[in-house]
Amino acid sequence: MRFALIDAAKTAFPVHRLCRVLGVSQSGYFAWKGRLACRRQHDDMVLLAHVRSALALSNGTYGSPRMTRELQASGLAVGRRRTARLMRENGLRARQKQRFKRTTDSHHAWPIAPNLLDQDFAAA
């Protein structure tokens, strides 16, 4: 977490000063920067690419349960919670289809109710 903060702020401040303020060594920061991602992070990046492509193919309508079934059908070993975490961390949300709700039907075939009060509703 500290190294990520240093990496984000290194354009505004020198690295040695940021390391001294946060109480970490410069060599530790540069070792972190040059280190490869762990296997779990690498697998997450691969899964995220599959999630993004499946979400694009579904027009953004797949949530984590359906996305998990889709990934499992394509041969990937993944659970629903991991899929949900990847989608949540990367801002991927399922878009729900909204039904068209008609509020008025002016072109119906039924007769119009009679004016029982005999009032004139015409405007001048």
Image (cartoon, rainbow, N blue to C red):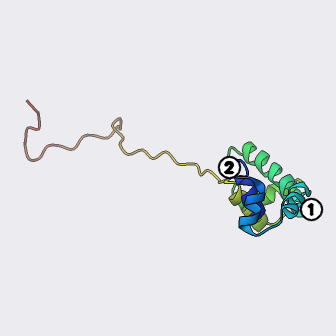
Residue indicated by mark 1: 39
Identify the residue at image location x=35%, y=38%: 108
The quarter of the displayed image where residue 35 is located: bottom right
Q: Amino acid at mark 2?
A: Ala
The quarter of the displayed image where residue 81 is located: bottom right
- The image position of residue 57, as x and y in percent, is 75, 43
Horizontal side, residue 116 vs residue 67: left or right = left
Residue 3 visible in the picture: yes
User: Which residue, as the protein is rendered here, is positioned at the far top?
Assistant: 124
Residue 86 visible in the picture: no
The quarter of the displayed image where residue 86 is located: bottom right
Query: Could you say whether the residue bearing mark 1 is in a helix, strand or loop?
Result: helix
Tag shown at residue 12: 2
Query: Could you say whether the residue bearing mark 2 is in a helix, strand or loop?
Result: loop
Which is more toward the observer, 26 or 50? 26
Sequence-wise, the earlier of marks 1 and 2 is 2
Horizontal side, residue 23 vs residue 41: left or right = left
User: Which residue, as the protein is rendered here, is positioned at the far bottom?
Assistant: 23
Which is more toward the observer, 10 or 84? 10
- The image position of residue 112, as x and y in percent, is 24, 40
Identify the residue at image location x=77%, y=55%: 15
In the image, residue 99 sits, relative to residue 17, either above or below, namely above
